[in-house]
Image (cartoon, rainbow, N blue to C red):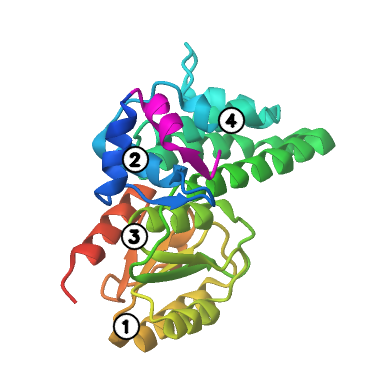
Amino acid sequence: MKDLCSTGDAARALGVSESSVRRWVDGGALKSERTAGGHRRVLVADLVRYARAKELEWRRPELLELEVSVTSDCSEVELLFEALRTADLPRASRLVVGPFVDGRALDELFDDLVAPAMAQVGELWRGGVEGILAEHRATSIGIGLIRRLRELLPTPKGLAAIGGAIEGDPYSMPSQMAETLLRANGFDAFDLGPNTPIPVIAAAARERGARLAWVSANAVSDTVLKRQQILDAVEECGPRGVTFVLGGRKSAELQLPLDAGVRQVASMRGLQRIAAEIVGAPD
């Protein structure tokens, strides 16, 4: 994807007049920069944001090196899994990034496409050395796609959010998806990555003045200790206005009480709802 484009290329990519693009820039709806020669250059990520918000249809996205959606008789999950398994990066990118560019919501994209495809990827390790190689390669590609989606989001300037995968959890993608989803909701979110101790997440939440802290739990050891660490973090950070959100397929094993101050979610749609609540809540 290009970082900047001319107003002419922006217009042709969307099938609108160049005067319309200039009007959007002049009105502040689109961000732009000036070249040394005084020519306007539109930020492509901001153009994607504007097109999604206005539900504009892309005509020639290839002019901006944007992926386009693909269609097939196969299910999109099967198509993505096969693209990941065979390390077909261009096709995987069209399957994931293309729908987002076309306006698909991130929580839907993650829950209905990326997560089920990656669940199939997780089974590849059963195939011996070749299977493990395919799984690691596919996971690396998947993480790269999440980062590419993040590049298409505006620079976050809203409430701070922090999180990561629980200590002992080596899976990075769920937390990467959480960070990206929160950034799409305006949060200045930062993923601390896999295998992060809960006290570290709590300390980072205090340091950044975070309003939301997420804990991804897809592999949990010593549930008694982890449970107590989360309760301690909530007791310490709750009065500071931090909402803790716990998710992941192993999160139920922690058996947190309903009044613990932790919101538990089973999907990115659940995180989306909580993010919208926090953003919409009065200070």
Residue nearer the viewer, 88 or 221: 88
Badge 2 amino acid = Ala
Could you tell me which residue is drawn at 46 percent across and 44 percent down?
39
As helix, strand or loop, the secondary structure at mark 4 comes to helix
Q: Earlier in the sequence, mark 1 or mark 2?
A: 2
Res 78 visible:
yes
Could you tell me which residue is drawn at 19 percent across and 77 percent down?
283
- Crowding around mark 1 (Cα neighbors within 10 Å: few <14, some 14 to 19, many 20+) is some
Badge 4 amino acid = Ala
Asked whether 6 falls inside the magenta stretch, the response is yes
Badge 1 amino acid = Gly
Q: Which mark is residue 238?
A: 1
* Closer to the eye: label 4 or 3: 3
Q: Earlier in the sequence, mark 4 or mark 3?
A: 4
The residue that label 4 is drawn on is 92
Q: Earlier in the sequence, mark 2 or mark 4?
A: 4
